[in-house]
Amino acid sequence: MIPGLLHLALDLALLGFIAERWTRSTSVVSPTERWAEGLLLGLTLIVVGGLVLGYAGALNTWALTGFFGLFAIAVGLRPGQLPAAPPITRKTPSPEATPPAFRVALGLGACLLVIFLIVASCSTPLVYDALTYRMPRIGHWLQEQSLHPFATNDSRQNFMALAPDLTMLWLTGHFPDGFRLTAVAQWLGGTLMLLHVWQLGALLGLTRPARITALFLAGGLGNVVPQFLSDQTDLFTAGLVTAALARWLAACRNRRFDPWAGVALGLAFASKGTVFYAAPAIALIAVGAAWIWHMPVKLLGRHAAAGTIALIAFAGPRMWENHRVYGNPWAPPDMIEHLHAGDAGELPRKLAANLVSCATQTLEPHANSPWLAPLLQPAGRWLIAHQPADREFVYEGAARSSKLTQVFDRRTADADVVAIGVAPLLLALLGAGLALAHWRQGDAGTRGIALLGVASGVFVVFYNVMQHWHPYAFRYFVLLAPMLGLCGAWALDRLAQGSNWLLLICIALQLATAANLFCNTYQVGWRNLSARDRVRDYAVVQAQRRLLGRLPPAATACVVLPYNFPLAGCYRLPNGPRIRQTPLAVLRAQPTAAAFLDSASAEAMLCPLPWFEGRAGPSTVTTFVLPGQADSPFNLACYRRPQAAGGRPAR
């Protein structure tokens, strides 16, 4: 543990030196900008190093340290000023004062952010996606020191975007076992988002109280708070999208070239497929901002070239691998069909049904502050009862009403399904509507707010036209958090007309929502530290570690687990065996577990319990059965050669 922390500290020192040297420029006018640009630079170096080393077959944390060291030497030896980006904000002779109440609120927010960092650092991955494919792919990359596709029964380990997972790999790879610190990657993305929300607020002319309110609105949304503490990738992606938008709007206003806008956008596209659903909205903001601030055509061309190069550099390698393996740059064709099926003539009906389901989910209790949630329950239950009776356009083929009822009935929040909440959504709609109404007589900031509001609507509509509905969509809508926060804060500032009590009430509601989600989300936050043993998936992962941890370090263990099965516990064991994921067809071709072990030349094999029950052959078996769930599909059997097991009996 201590050597890992020292190694991480060395990497942080190198990245800190590079960021400090890079941002030492008169064009960076505020500490917020220096932190934002330094964090973006650090994430860029981590991803670039991971891509280069991963495709070269030399991916490990010491190699990454060497990469950072070489870059630090190059930066340190370069004489004179480095090519810093143009400023986002401009120096003002008399900065606006912050009212005392908002200083207190900002301090509370900073304390909450530090608490989130501490808890994220101590958390264990419990989010289902992380356990099924995100942590296993990181474990496999570290084992093989390569990013190339590999044999697996869950193709998501291969075709999913790379950038946030490479950041998680860098964080956890300093330690010899387990998946420590992986949630910190999301925290870094959330911090990047908040830094650029502040800068966007300055660009759009929001007052300091309104900008502070925008931070709480964006960072305190129901679907955002759990992401600060999870092992997903949505908030990481949102931070990069926000950085790209802030840099672009600043470049348009200042009429200067800013390569960081393209770099951030390229990293965002290399982070999550959701960004491709947001592409129409991003294009609208790009064109709209260029028109509002009269961006010269020559600079438009330079930015387009920079963005294209960054997109090819960061997203291109994985898209090429996907095309080579699956014949499609995005994902296997059957998965694309499963997510998007629907005739063109049915799209209006699909959109209407999906929007009604999304609107219903915003009323769920955990997404709203404890003071508002009881008042919204009757409306939510009424909308559930009036959902379409058929199961069309639903991802998992289940009835919409049953899925929504499960969300509303949860005693604890689920980080994957928590929605935005009614009050922030209505405020954002109000802000966008007011800005549109004042488009003609409004200034550039007003038009910018209107642009963000319209773009948010374009994203929601395009997403719901393309995708089947499922309750997890609000996790993808984290990309909207900056826009919703800025539009809502702008509306409150206009309604308050110089009085700050509306803004402070909004901040209090968001703090209450954040505190409730921190304490009552079952995979993340306080429950991750205090009640992780009660989570079924955690028990399955710990069982895998026990079953495979008995093997000698030189052993080879075949893991034959089906699609969407938690298998994070198979990787990164203390002195653990070499893991080889094996296709199901190989298992089914063998009559007994012993025959499989012989054909695979492996010392052990982990599979679901029922697959070889009564057909072990001359091999020993150790089983795991969830307490009280003898028929659970998550029950496991570990078959071993007798010599590998030391001749011990089956149980």
Image (cartoon, rainbow, N blue to C red):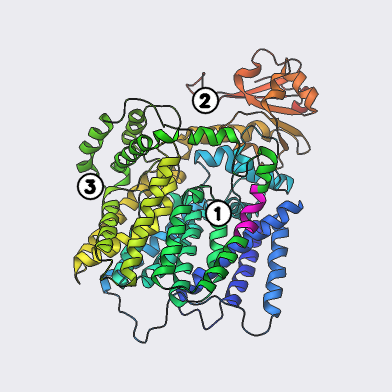
- The secondary element bearing badge 1 is classed as helix
- The secondary element bearing badge 3 is classed as loop
Residue tagged 1: 269
Position of 418 with respect to 619 (left or right) is left
- Res 58 seen here: no
Q: Please say if 16 is above or below 367.
A: below
Who comes first in sequence, dot 2 or dot 1? 1
Figure disc tally:
3
Residue tagged 3: 372
**Could you tell me the amino acid type at mark 2?**
Leu
Q: Position of residue 597 (x, y in %)?
A: 76, 24
**Residue 626 shows which numbered tag?**
2
Position of 386 with respect to 264 (left or right) is left
For discs 2 and 1, the disc positioned in front in the rendered view: 1
Residue pictured at 19% horizontal, 43% vertical: 375
**Could you tell me the amino acid type at mark 3?**
Leu
Quadrant of the image occupied by residue 594: top right
Find out whether residue 298 is within the magenta segment: no
In the image, 371 versus 8, the foreground residue is 371
Who comes first in sequence, dot 3 or dot 1? 1
- Res 632 seen here: yes
In the image, 36 versus 349, the foreground residue is 349
Look at the image and give the residue range highlighted in magenta.
Answer: 310-319
| Mark 2 burial class by Cα count in 10 Å: few <14, some 14-19, many 20+ | some
Find out whether residue 317 is within the magenta segment: yes
